Image: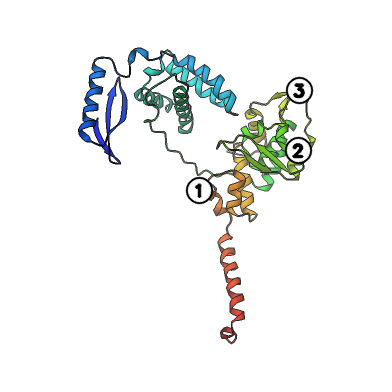
Amino acid sequence: MGVYQRERIWWIDYYRLGRRYRERGSPIKAMAELALKKRHVEIAENKFLDVKKVQKIKFDDFADEYLQLHSKVNNRGWKTESYSINTLKKHFSGKYLHEITSHMVDIFKQELSKTLKPASVNRRLCTLKTMFNKAGFWGKFSGPNPVAMVKFFKLNNTRLRFLEKDEIVTLLAHCHDHLKGIVIVALNTGMRKAEILGLKWRDVDIKRNILYLRETKNGEKMEVPINEQVKTVLINTLRLPQSEYIFNYNGKRIVDIKRSYSTAVENSGIKDFTFHDLRHTFASHLVMNGVDLNTVRELLGHKTLQMTLRYSHLSANHKHKAVESLFKSIDTVWSQDPKFENE
């Protein structure tokens, strides 16, 4: 706590009610120290940030508003996010937004880690962080985001599980009709579950063999090429006039397939295989069939090659092929050079 320099600017660092504040000060250290003293006086006199004007908004109320105005409107996987919000409401119930500090969030993180996996804890922290960002954007909260200084758990995202060809046949044989089409689309496009369940008939271009994803995990639009197997699924899927969604149940959008999918996997005798692993299966078989990694990256919608590199080891001979192709091109040059004719 005090003043510190960063990129030729002196910043001030202080606490109020357990919450840390850092502000841009001045290029001159003495001016920054003066600004820090002013903040200490304001805190002592209860005039900091004009405390009287702080909006008293209950976390529970804002959570409900966030779910309705943000999650349901912008997030295809809002049902999953609602579970995180329910967990957050149980912990922060009765608190005002401006009362929640980084210390409280750290306590929340510690308590959750006793019963949930690190990835599940991180999802709830991520939801909380987004909620405070949105609260600030809506003018319902001022001050630093209390989650910003909380460290998320480091995760091992190198897990790579995919099905062999015979396992794919077995899994499809144990899928009910409503599930089989969804699994086939996942295996042949690499699309995520939320993206598939959110597909609408307007997103299909049969003539051009393309599915249009209007919103992906990266927040970008994407064109997904489809093959004959996916086209067959779409053509054979009954289109109900009362539903705009391709995969629906009695005209209503399918929210989740967790139970039916788990049953199909269990009946197939396949161990430790999630729906997301269908995406890995798609990418793995592309690589094993000789498709270059950059094309796989584009098909998966990865922004960088780093995520796609996890599949590189599956192409056991791709380095050998590269060296052989180089040799062939050099050999052609050598064969045309008289100096090498007798060697």
Q: CA distance from mark 3 to mark 1?
A: 43 Å
Nearest-to-viewer mark from 2 and 3: 3
Residue 162 can be seen in this image:
no
Residues at circles 3 and 1 in contact by the CB criterion of under 8 Å: no
Nearest-to-viewer mark from 3 and 1: 3
Whether 98 is drawn above or below 264: the answer is: above
Amino acid type at image mark 3: Gln
Label 2 crowd (10 A; few <14 / some 14-19 / many >=20)? some
- Residue topped by disc 1: 306
Residue at the extreme bottom: 342
* Rendered residue at 42%/35% (across/down): 153
Q: Which quadrant holds the N terminus? A: top left
- Residue topped by disc 3: 242
* Rendered residue at 52%/20% (across/down): 66
Q: Which quadrant holds the C terminus? A: bottom right
Residue 323 locus on image (x, y percent): 56, 66
Disc on the earlier residue, 1 or 2: 2
Q: Callout 2: helix, strand or loop? A: helix
- Residue topped by disc 2: 233
